[in-house]
Image: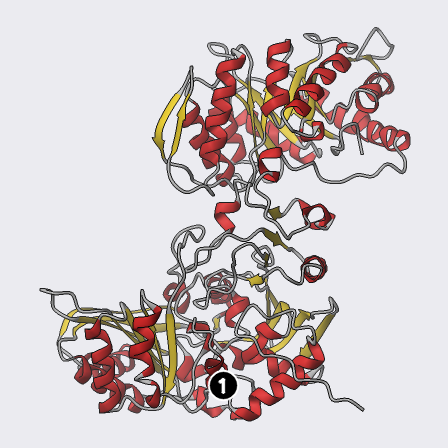
Amino acid sequence: MLGYGHRLEFGITIPPVLPEGAAAFARRAEELGYDVVTFRDAPGRSLDAWTLASWVAGRTDRVRVGAHVPCATPAVLARAAASLDLLSGGRLELGLGAGEEAAALGEAIDIIRGLLDAGERGPLRFEGEHYRVRGARRGPAPERYVPVHVEAHDPPMLRLAGRKADGWVATLGRIKAGGIRAANGLLDETAREAGRDPREIRRLLNISGRFSGERGGFLDGPPGAWVEDLLPLVIEEGVGTLVLATDGAEGMERFAREVVPALREAAGRELAGAPSGPAVRPAWVRARRQPGIDYGRIPASLGENAVEPGDPAYARVRSTYLRGGAPGLVLRAGSPEQVAEALAFARSHPEVPLGIRSGGHGISGRSTNRGGIVIDLSKMDGIEVLDEASRRVRLGPGARWMDVAAALAPYGWGLSSGDYGGVGVGGLATAGGIGWLARKRGLTIDRLRAVEMVLADGSVVRAGGEENPDLFWAVRGAGANFGIVTSFEFEAYEVGEVGWGQFLVDASDTAGLLRRWGAAVEVAPRDLTSFIILGAQRPGRPAVAQVFAVVDSDRPEVVAGQLEPVARAAPVYDQSAVITPYASVMANAQGSYHEARGEPVARSGLIRHITPRFAAAAEMLLRSGAAYFFQIRSVGGAVSDVAPEATAYAGRSANFHVAAFGASPERLDAAWDAMRTHFEGTYLSFETDRRPERLREAFPPGVLERLRELKGRYDPENVFRDNFNIPPAERRQG
């Protein structure tokens, strides 16, 4: 732990050169291993630092970008900072303070932090002596916490840095080496008075010097002399970042090759055995921690990717597609080992809710919670072709299906995977997967060949047809109850261009439309899979329905012939039919992250036929206003070819899946319960009713009994319970 507990880092100040020269300079710094490149504003003498930093951020991949800029309009600067941090993948460091007055800068920092805190609902209002903000909208949420560094050399600015900054920046020359200790003392004292830990503040020092054959003074001499001069600043004065100012590439190269490694090694020797770890969380983050979670024991490997309610990135991870959430901690794991560590941390909090998230789309909404822990798998988004001959592919749980479709398209392959490209692989591939090619190709789980997963006890196992076949059986339909799948192996199939039809039709005769559409789908060749969507009828407006269909063929006459009977189910207001790559059908995700609020209310059922009685009941449901969204998806075909006992998914006999969304659980339940006599099961991915009856509808008695026995074997403590929970069977005595 160097000085204040920060990893020793090195930066370079980019000279005021033309944009392409600055980009080349920064790319070379990145290659040499520098941690940060910085830009300073010098009005009238160089390019604007903020613009130049943005330009360079777009031409580098890893190195962080530090922009030291004036703060005349903090609200505008906050929005620009959030945007640049997002565009750069979380690489921005914001530097303030040169030539500014401490009181005004303190207010500016409060405004910037307030606007970057997109996790707070509502606009920002701020009344200060120097700045006033009345109703400024927050956001966009940055990729991560944007550190604010304050350049300070006099006591007022040092006190400001101690109260509010994430980093203190000083320039050697303006401050003497011996004066750093006194400045640190004032910083530390002020930080403690403000209720902060002094370790929250990184100490950054701008340096410059001359490489020569013989020592001529401080930072004037051979690389070894530089190491001798800089080592006390790191060990004794707590400097965590050294930023070199040089006008030429030669100085940058020599510092990186001959000073940095030697200085790291020397510092390591001096501090041998001292612990190291992530920086201390800022006080304003710690202030929002929720009771019941031991934040101090977050595994070190997950610390940098842990998101707490006080973090600006919290807005990006708190909610899912339909459900608003307020978890106490989101652990973003990037490997099976990190998943196991996150799970061990969660197991040590048995009273705290636990959610598992891949893409965060799940209709059931269980991948977020309130006050609990969420293990987020979105970083595990790899897509890898294992064997072209057998079309074997490995997918990470955090990959999105639109990205999977795009990655497989060049090979002429595909996988049926729901109807929305933003869905994550993990949730869908452990539940079922009713997609656009279901009648021809089956469910998503029907192409699954093996999984790697972390069990409740933290062990990592492989399950497939030969290894742990009972676990593999359970994963395909009830996977959320048995562990966290960290990779899926699928056997893709050949699929090229497909027919894609979209129709807006008259739904004034709702029951008749549903009967005719259902009958057309049931007799259609398996090439065709169709979905229909209706909403509550609005007074004074015609009732309409959307009909979608995919035909697994690139022959125009086949596509037209199979779409025509579906389109004839009702008069058509508008239509579109194209032959297009399957990947383009799946490329329909919108937005960068989920911002849902409230609790979804959804009901689900499986049915063999669209009978006149069911169609009439569905029309009554829509006319009642209890459901604002009503969808029927066609299944059957290849889905029904799989033996019912082959997977835990038990709805093989159904030709249709029905789902409804409403605003009131009481109203929707009253209408839906009256329709239950028509259903022969349910698909839990579209269900939010957690009454025990739903579990019995999803799994027949024999299947549920087997699942309970396996649950008792693989998760006897019921760690994975914050879902449609299958309780473990009681262990027999004797």
Determine whether, in the image, residue 130 is placed left or right of residue 161. Answer: left
Residue 540's quadrant in the figure?
Answer: bottom left
Determine whether, in the image, residue 76 is placed left or right of residue 460. Answer: left
Depth order, front residue of 367/534: 367
Depth order, front residue of 24/633: 633
Residue 616's quadrant in the figure?
Answer: bottom left
What residue is pinned by disc 1?
A: 696
- Three-letter amino acid code at the position of disc 1: Arg
Residue 304 position, x and y percent, is 66, 44
Depth order, front residue of 410/697: 697
Depth order, front residue of 25/167: 167
Residue 413 position, x and y percent, is 49, 72
**Please, what secondary structure does the residue beneath circle 1 have?**
helix
From this view, report whether residue 172 is shown above or below residue 611.
above
Residue drawn at 42 percent across, 59 percent down: 321
Residue drawn at 17 percent across, 85 percent down: 512
From this view, report whether residue 514 is shown above or below residue 228.
below
Q: How many neighbours does mark 1 have within 10 angstroms: few (below 14), some (14-19), or many (20 or more)?
A: some
**Can residue 56 be seen in the rendering of this structure?**
yes
- Counting the numbered discs, the total is 1
Residue 225 position, x and y percent, is 86, 16
Residue drawn at 71 percent across, 34 percent down: 33
From this view, report whether residue 577 is shown above or below residue 140.
below
